[in-house]
Image (tube, helix red, strand yellow):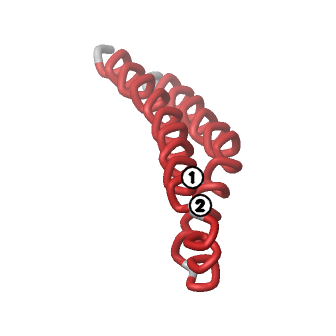
């Protein structure tokens, strides 16, 4: 019964970290959705072509995607290390 407490505390800690990461990443995810919608809509395609904004849109999407991906990697590694520490008990 005593081993349940550290496992619960660890799970609670990493659940909170995941929630806070999702909360921080909301603006980036919204931007990615907006850029994806903008690049895929027929109405915006004419303007993108007319003003030559396709390369800008692609670069902006890649930058936002890399930011989102980089932020997602860190807590996963920390969680794996935490689980490894707990499994040694």
Instruction: Identify the residue shown where x is 47% and y is 27%.
Output: 74
Which is more toward the observer, 59 or 34? 59
Instruction: Identify the residue shown where x is 64% and y is 48%.
Output: 28
Which is more toward the observer, 8 or 39? 39
Above or below, comparing residue 69 to residue 85 in the picture: below
Q: Can residue 69 be seen in this view?
A: yes
Which is more toward the observer, 13 or 88? 13
The label on residue 56 is: 1
Badge 2 is on which residue? Answer: 53
Above or below, comparing residue 41 to residue 38 in the picture: below
Q: Quadrant of residue 23?
A: top right
Q: Quadrant of residue 79?
A: top left
Q: Check the image and name the residue furthest to the bottom.
A: 42
User: Picture coordinates of residue 2 (x, y %)?
Assistant: 47, 22
Is disc 2 surrounded by few (<14), some (14 to 19) or many (20+) residues within 10 Å? some
Q: Is residue 8 left or right of residue 27?
A: left
Instruction: Identify the residue shown where x is 53% and y is 42%.
Output: 63
Per the image, label 1 sits on a secondary structure element best described as: helix
Per the image, label 2 sits on a secondary structure element best described as: loop
Is disc 1 surrounded by few (<14), some (14 to 19) or many (20+) residues within 10 Å? few
The C terminus, quarter of image: top left
User: Picture coordinates of residue 11 (x, y %)?
Assistant: 51, 34
The N terminus, quarter of image: top left
Give me the C-alpha separation between circle 1 and circle 2.
Answer: 5 Å
User: Picture coordinates of residue 47 (x, y %)?
Assistant: 64, 75
Instruction: Identify the residue shown where x is 56% and y is 27%.
Output: 9
The label on residue 5 is: none
Marks 1 and 2 close (CB-CB < 8 Å): yes
């Amino acid at each position: 019964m005593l081993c349940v407490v550290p496992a619960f505390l660890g799970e609670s800690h990493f659940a909170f970290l995941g929630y806070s990461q999702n909360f921080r990443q909301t603006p980036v995810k919204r931007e990615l959705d907006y850029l994806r919608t903008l690049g895929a809509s027929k109405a915006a395609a004419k303007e993108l072509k007319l003003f030559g904004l396709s390369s800008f849109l692609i670069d902006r999407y890649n930058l936002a995607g890399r930011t989102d991906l980089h932020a997602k990697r860190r807590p996963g590694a920390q969680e794996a290390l935490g689980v490894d520490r707990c499994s040694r008990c």
